Image (cartoon, rainbow, N blue to C red):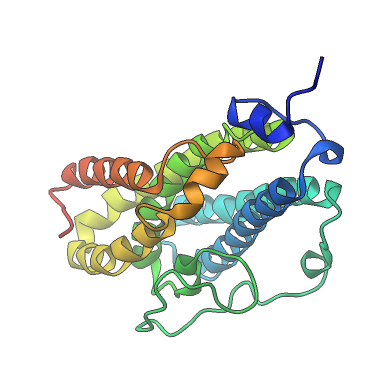
Amino acid sequence: MNEMPIEEYLAQGGRLTSPGNVPPRYRGELLRLMASFVDSELAASAGFADVINDAPGITSRIAAARIVLEKADHAERVLKVMAEFGADTSRYVGTHPWAARVARDADIGAVRQGGDMRLAVFHYPLAGWADAVVMNVLQGAAAVIQLQEYGRISYQPLAEVFRAIAPREARHAELGRAGLAQIMETAPDQVRAALEYWHPRVALGFGQKGSERFAMLKRLGLRHRPNEDLLAEWQSTIATQLAEHDLKVA
């Protein structure tokens, strides 16, 4: 009996379990996905590290420190899978400017900057505690949705890592919502300004609507839901969360 071609196997929902049996295109796309996640987590960790001392009180500082620690840990977990594919991980051993940011008023769209693969949203600087909390609420909700997608990818060892990470990223989002409730009591105008700034920038992280790459990634089992579906879920989730504080975005 002839064996099923691996591309057809993946298109029918098959799973791969080791680097040795993945086709070149699959390997390249999987490494791209992992690098984007690792770099985004490290950039996010570095960004929140800069605002720990802006946190109002010990509980908030602990929450911020936990996010910094756990995002770095999440990056390390995925980096271990990358290393199994022979990826060059030297950048993660030495120093890299993960805390580097563009000017606050820059408009880089979804274009990656600075020689790494972080999402564009992580190139923008945080402007104080309220701003950081709002960004965490928006990006935290996005991360929860993206990790649900990543937890279904066809490379089983990585899918298992993402499923293990998902509850902690959900907790980060919950910490953000708790912080938002506190800030709304004292600085609602800062919250509204931060929402106006961060909402469109986080939305860009879901990618283009009608992406031509999506069909190819779906055939490889690396994506399942199109960008516009993930974006719509995020928009609905955020609208519901903001409505709890009589907030909305345009």
Give the image quarter of residue 166.
Answer: top right
Q: Residue furthest left?
A: 246
Nearer to the camera, 249 or 63: 249
Is 243 located above or below residue 128 in the figure?
above
Residue 38 image position (x, y, % from top left) = 65, 56
Report the residue at 31% width, 40% height from top.
233
Residue 42 image position (x, y, % from top left) = 63, 61
Q: Does residue 95 appear in the picture of this structure?
A: yes
Q: Does residue 171 appear in the picture of this structure?
A: no
Which quarter of the rendered picture does the N terminus lie within?
A: top right
| Image position of 175 (left or right of 200) | right
Residue 110 image position (x, y, % from top left) = 43, 69
Report the residue at 22% width, 55% height from top.
184
Nearer to the camera, 66 or 207: 207
Nearer to the camera, 108 or 139: 108
Is 106 located above or below residue 196 in the figure?
below
